[in-house]
Amino acid sequence: MQSIIDVRQVTKTYASGFSALKGIDLQIRRGEIFALLGPNGAGKTTLISIICGIVNPSSGNVLADGHDVVRDFRAARERIGLVPQELTTDAFETVWDTVSFSRALFGKRPNSAYIEKVLRDLSLWNKKDSKLMTLSGGMKRRVMIAKALSHEPPILFLDEPTAGVDVELRRDMWAMVRALRDTGVTIILTTHYIDEAEEMADRIGVINKGELILVEGKAELMEKLGRKQLILQLQAPLQAIPAALAGYPLALSDDGQQLVYTFDAQGENTGIDTLLRRLGEAGIDFKDLQTRQSSLEDIFVSLVEDRA
Amino acid sequence: MKFNWHGMGAIYRFEMARTRRTLLQSIVSPVISTTLYFVVFGAAMGSHMGGIDGVSYGAYIVPGLIMLSLLTQSISNASFGIYFPKFTGTIYEILSAPVSYLEILGGYVGAAASKSVLLGVIILVTARLFVDFDVAHPIWMVAFLILTSVTFSLFGFIIGIWADGFEKLQLVPLLIVTPLTFLGGSFYSIHILPPLWQKISLFNPVVYLISGFRWSFYGVSDVSVEISMGMTLLFLAACMAGVWWIFRTGYRLKA
């Protein structure tokens, strides 16, 4: 399947000499939700800004739905909606006017039925005649999404959509993003909330210090890099791991109350059954046991730290 | 999509709506301050002052005063129009939209120039209430009015891009354009100056604008109307070159 966004060898060095992007190659599939994950200053916003035409790349090129974003900028930009990270809106305009402005700016003829639908979908309809400066932060965020959707783009960029947003609005936002995806819109979101990527994304790209260090389906990523742990709460504390269990990857907690066994969840033989048998033979009793799967956060932290 | 008329129209309407919201500041206040000059120098003191080049003093200063408003208002309107979205960050939307530089210019500079032409006409009509004058060459008058509005709106656009603070926005109109206009023959003919100052005045670009504009009213001028028109077109070309360079390099617009 042809990718809807094709980033080829894009680099960006700012005038200060700072190298924000070091040769990014990235293909976004049509209709997916792609999460670009990375710490602050990793290059997420720079990459999005280049795709959307706000920043010029130093080298390389980007195709949006087959159109070069520099040479064929009209066709490329018509297809893209952008919700930037900062809440930047006019103050004196009404919600209706600012969304209509965006539609016209992107070259579309007026369509009040469509604008009404967008505003209703975003629960903005009863605010349509309010001036922007009277709206709360969450409402402004919705207005910016409405502006980005006003020209019916098949590609939507959300730069940190839930930064500084309360829990309820965050849930709403996620539901809205899913609903959009169901209508066929491709969504690229950046976030440094890992649970957001875990919750939403079909695929995940991890960017750090201007390099894309990994692009994977979320499920594969969790499988490939995910570790499982078995935690045993002991009846009586141990001083050391008994010699009988020396062959196992075991760790003893500082207080001697917990024995932690790390294993590969994908392995044919997890070794749990023999471990438990050996424990019985060694006379070690436990009162509770639990298993724990590493989260995307653990994976992310280990990836970024490896490269540090 | 070849030319984004909707996009250009959206910017133009946005800017015109801003004028309507700030009617007092953008139209009423320059009209009143200019009218004060007509009242004082035309109606009140005019009869005690000798005319210049056979034109009564009150009438003589009308073209120069219209030019003064035209220049300062074109610059401040256009510079504020593009500076403000840069300041608030809403410029992101313009930069990410399928609008070319021509459409951005058509929207911002077109709106600023429209306001200036409108303002010029209002001041002209108001002046007629206090001072008696005729317009000898209306077509030239309109041509100067429009060309000056467009040129100085372009100049204002450049200043708005260049400015990185509200202070710089005020700097050029207050410290450069207003003195040049006062010294450019708004209130006198440069022929009454000593020879050295006459020569120095010829380096003041505003002299040509005022002289040409006044010629279109009364048929009298400090420099010939062809030279005035030529200089006006030269300034227009210079501003267009400046804008072209800004968009080509992305100066202060794109990293």
Image: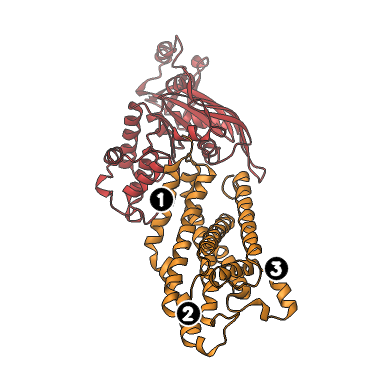
Chain colours: A red, B orange
* Position above or below: B75 against B57: above
Q: Which residue is mark 1?
A: A89
Question: At 28% from the left edge and 45% from the top edge, which residue is drawn?
Answer: A124
Mark toward the viewer: 1 or 2: 2
What chain letter is assigned to the residue under label 1?
Answer: A
Amino acid on which disc 3 is placed:
Phe
What chain letter is assigned to the residue under label 2?
Answer: B
Q: CA distance from mark 1 to mark 3?
A: 44 Å
Q: Which mark is residue B38?
A: 2
Same chain for labels 1 and 2? Say yes or no: no
Mark toward the viewer: 1 or 3: 3
Mark 2 is surrounded, within 10 Å at the Cα level, by few (under 14), some (14 to 19) or many (20 or more) other residues, namely: many
Residue A189 visible to an observer of this rendering: no
Assess whether mark 2 and mark 1 are in contact (beta carbons under 8 angstroms). no
Q: Residue furthest right?
A: B196
Amino acid on which disc 1 is placed:
Thr
Secondary element at image label 3: loop
Q: Which residue is mark 3?
A: B203
Q: Residue furthest bottom?
A: B48
Amino acid on which disc 2 is placed:
Phe
Question: At 55% from the left edge and 59% from the top edge, which residue is drawn?
Answer: B147
Q: Quadrant of residue A277?
A: top left
Whole-percent x, y for residue A261 in the image: 45, 21
Same chain for labels 2 and 3? Say yes or no: yes
Q: CA distance from mark 2 to mark 3?
A: 28 Å
Q: Which mark is residue B20?
A: none
- Between residues A16 and B75, which one lies in front from this camera angle? B75
Q: Is residue B235 left or right of residue A299?
A: right
Secondary element at image label 1: loop
- Between residues B57 and B36, which one lies in front from this camera angle? B57
Whole-percent x, y for residue B79 in the image: 53, 59
* Position above or below: A130 against A230: below
